Amino acid sequence: MIEGVKFTKEHEWVKMTNEGQAIIGISDFAQQQLGDIVSVELPKVGSNFRRMQTMAIVDSVKASSDIYSPLSGEVMQVNVELSEHPEWINQSPYELGWMVKLNPLDIEELDKLMTTDQYREFIGETDKQE
Amino acid sequence: MVDFHGWEMPLQYSGIIDEHVNTRIKVCMFDVSHMGRFEVRGPNALDCLQILATNDVSKIKDYSALYSPFCYDDGGIVDDLIIYRNTEEKFLLVVNASNRDKDLEWVTKHCNSAVVENISDKTILLAVQGPLAQHVMEKVTGLNNLVAMKAFEFTITDILGAQAIISKTGYTGEDGFEILLDASEISIWDKIMDMGSEFKIKPAGLGARDTLRVEAGLMLYGNDIDKNVTPLEAPLKWTVKFEKPEFIGKEALVRRQIDRKLVGFELLEKRIARHGNEVFLKSSGQKIGFVTSGTFSPSLKKSIGFCFVPNYVSPAQLIEIDIGGKLYQAKVKNSTRFYKRIGR
């Protein structure tokens, strides 16, 4: 898990860049639960989402999952390479597997998200660490 | 682990795609002990199975097996299963896990002049599947003639000290074997994994079992076929032998008008259709059917599946599938079989 990242209860992560953009993807825990990811449907650049609105869909061999926007805002960029390499979400969920860059409307919405420690506890990882 | 009709089963070990590919190019082992197993014995065994099965049980030779549906009076499918013949008076049925109780009741009811014994809990069933399965099996049995074994033949032999029935059957579209053993012989799993390591054997779970069988065009009861589907609508016409004087469902199947068919489709966009998704005709927008199975094909790297459509829909015709409220284009295929192993 990487630092400086916040999480939703639906297992999306968001990381703010120095330029104030929000990079969004799904957590390592989420990709493990989904298994082999074989396709991703990403939003159009310029589209707007409210917080926790469906912005993308990930299909794994097992199941289809809605991906929710952790913040309200406008899509500035999407990771077009995922169309050819959906497996990057499995292999590198926090780096190569990023999905959307968003221009957030209200930066205070970040406070509603979980910190890395809170997320670890949420998914039960702290229990396993003995 | 997932719950599968009351069985705690691994969905995957190393990953569905990895297990799928390993089955296609090398060999994988599946624990399929959840399947139901019944023996049907006695002088009337053949006659009663001949009444139950749509396929011709009298054509099975000793040490051979046959795939057949059982139907209800109205032609709907009770289950699809494999019937193994030891002798004219001793058969083994391998049925779907989801139908174990229902099938046992059905067979017992219609075979009251034969002995029906549920041996499911006394036995285990393993499947070793893939182009290298034969090498693994020759190593563990010490036999060197398994290459001569034809599809659906079986033999009774010894595997590492345990008595086993080995059949050339499977649910993957690959060459492969299924092994029936006494439940006390469960340590055989580890021994086969050890001895198979030189052939790069891997364990495989329910996930790969499903993607493999969809690629191979094989039906899954509860998804593609059920009591509301006749074998004539499914691609199982070949299993219905109308020349047999009698079998349950025959009259209905002769009379029943068939106006839909189960076909394969290839989704032209990057989504995966799932069971229950609705199907529309591209040209008119009319709703014409539904998806029974859908998955990603690791061999073709395409999104594939089966759906019901009216008889008038022809191969290569464009349909649209509603996935989560959006329509995606798909192409109807000639058959439900997407994958054929080399040499078949």
Image (cartoon, coloured by chain):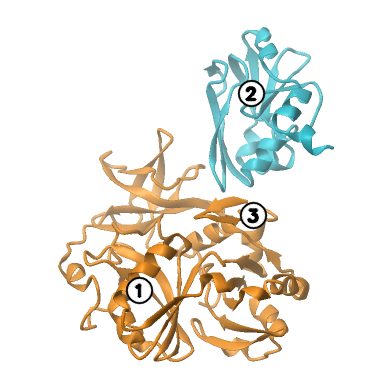
From this viewpoint, is residue B174 visible?
no
Q: In this view, does B259 lie above or below B138?
A: above
Mark drawn on residue B108: 1
N-terminal of the pair, mark 3 or mark 1, is 3
- Asked if labels 2 and 3 share a chain, the reply is no
Q: Which of marks 2 and 3 is in front?
A: 3
Say which element carries label 2: strand
Chain represented in orange: B
Of the residues tagged 3 and 1, which is closer to the observer? 1
- Above-or-below relation of B64 to B295: below
Give the drawing colour for chain A: cyan
Foreground pick, B137 / B249: B249
Q: Residue at x 62, y 88 (%)?
A: B157
Give me the chain letter of mark 3.
B
Percent across and percent down for residue A59 are 55, 41
Residue B80, quarter of picture: bottom left
- Per the image, the residue denoted by label 3 is B12
Q: Mark 2 lies on which chain?
A: A
As helix, strand or loop, the secondary structure at mark 3 comes to loop
Q: How crowded is mark 3: few (under 14 residues within 10 Å), some or many (20 or more)?
A: many
> Dots 3 and 1: beta carbons under 8 Å?
no
Nearer mark to the viewer, of 2 and 1: 1
